[in-house]
Image (cartoon, grey):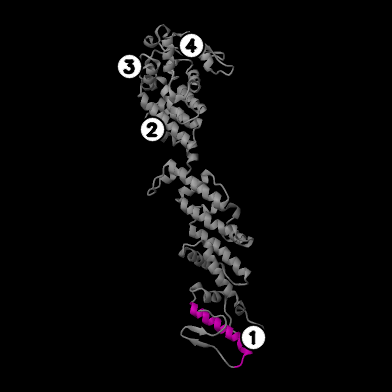
Amino acid sequence: MSTGTTGSGAGLGAGVGSVFGAGLGNLTNLGNVSASANSLTLVIPNDKKYFGSHAGQKISIPLTSTGELTLTAFKDATDSLDPNALTNLYAVMGLDDKSLGANLSARAAMVLPALVADKGEVSKLDIPLLSQLAINADNTKVISYYKNAQTQADQPVLLGQSQSAIYSAMANAQNYLIQWNIDTPEVEKVITDAVKSGMTNLNEVMNNIRSTETYRKAFAGLAEYNAVPGHIKMTENEYRSYSQAVMGAAQQYGGFTPSQAQIGEILKGNVSAAEFNKRVQDIAAQVDNADQNVKDLLKREFNVDTNHLFAWWANPKEALPDLQRAVATADVQDYAQRVGLGGLSFKGAEQLAQMAKMAGTAGNQGLGYGIGQIENAELAASRDVGLTKTLPGQNTPTVDTNTLLASQLAGFGGINQTAAQTQVARAEEAKVAPFEKGGGYAESAKGVIGLGSART
């Protein structure tokens, strides 16, 4: 041990924190000392410079019925040490190290369970590791990590490596586990196994952690996404932000909470959080406000069960325009039925849906805006639905549903709007001709004028 750390307890405590591994770590192995159910054998480090005649001394300390070491029992058992040896013992054990707690009781709550884990051998106490772990976890977790590291790591291998590098890699890895909420026994063992093999590079330790099942479940889809050429690599912290954004949109607009596996599927499909938000917000609003007939049409024509909408709009193979088209198709079909505009084919409804989607997108409007525009055209066309039928005893020209819609919507069905308007006007003229004298219809270069409901 460095001579610069002798003297007062405060001086020794400051030095022990930085040179503990190089000093006490090389003390003579005193053999395995086990704690019984009733007592613990405390073994003072075998260093006469600091402990004088007490060096290597063994002191029996009673434990509680549950095998715990209390501060009172520890004080009573060590009270017979001379003042200098006692001060140095407290310093070596970290009981004067404020990083382990603001007062002696708090520090003892960290150190004494570790001492029991080390079977009473003070020289095996890993104070720097305890100190670093204490920053990021509550007392229960710190002791759990500490016991796992001390019981499973190969101590001789540890002592042959750079102590600061080992402590740094272990503490930083544990910190990530806590941040990511994956501090399970499986992952903790990965860290201790890595240290046991002499691994001190944090990146190597983290790569081992990334191979665990716990990690893969917590970050579902991340490895697959990052493996695709051209994808902008995503870190675990970025993934957590992405996951929270997706879950927030699903809960706010869709009324459901996706699983981590479902979020992973979205990511693997390269669906951004913003796009998913748009999908849920735009589509959910339309479906939630739809009547049962629309929902039945979605189920029959697109195999969309409104009780399982997530699997639909989160499907990476389904682009937002496709989702919009499906909902709009069902909407315009339903509206045509309700206003009595018969004869609208599924193909025609799909074209109307595409026009609705484009109308909504053009002004950065929602899908509902475009659907509203199309439904207004359907309503206008329905006023001339009588022209699609021939009255008994009459041989009058008729028009079909596509022509009526084409007279309202330029380009629908591949029909020229002016030609459609002319055909509708002629059909109206023919309907009223038997009841009027003379007359006829007038045409201009702009189409039929002055008749019925022909529109320009």
Q: Position of residue 33 (x, y in %)?
A: 48, 13
Q: Are marks 1 and 3 in contact (CB under 8 Å)?
A: no
Q: Residue furthest top?
A: 53
Q: Amino acid at mark 3?
A: Gly
Residue to which mark 1 is pinned: 394
Residue to which mark 4 is pinned: 78
Crowding near the residue tagged with mark 3, few <14, some 14–19, many ≥20 C-alpha atoms within 10 Å: few
Element type where label 2 sits in the image: helix
Give the number of callouts. 4
Residue range of the region highlighted in magenta in the rendering: 416-437
Residue to which mark 2 is pinned: 202
* Magenta run includes residue 249: no
* Magenta run includes residue 418: yes
Q: Position of residue 298 (x, y in %)?
A: 58, 60
Residue 52 found in image quarter:
top left
Residue to which mark 3 is pinned: 4
Label located before the other in sequence (1 or 2): 2
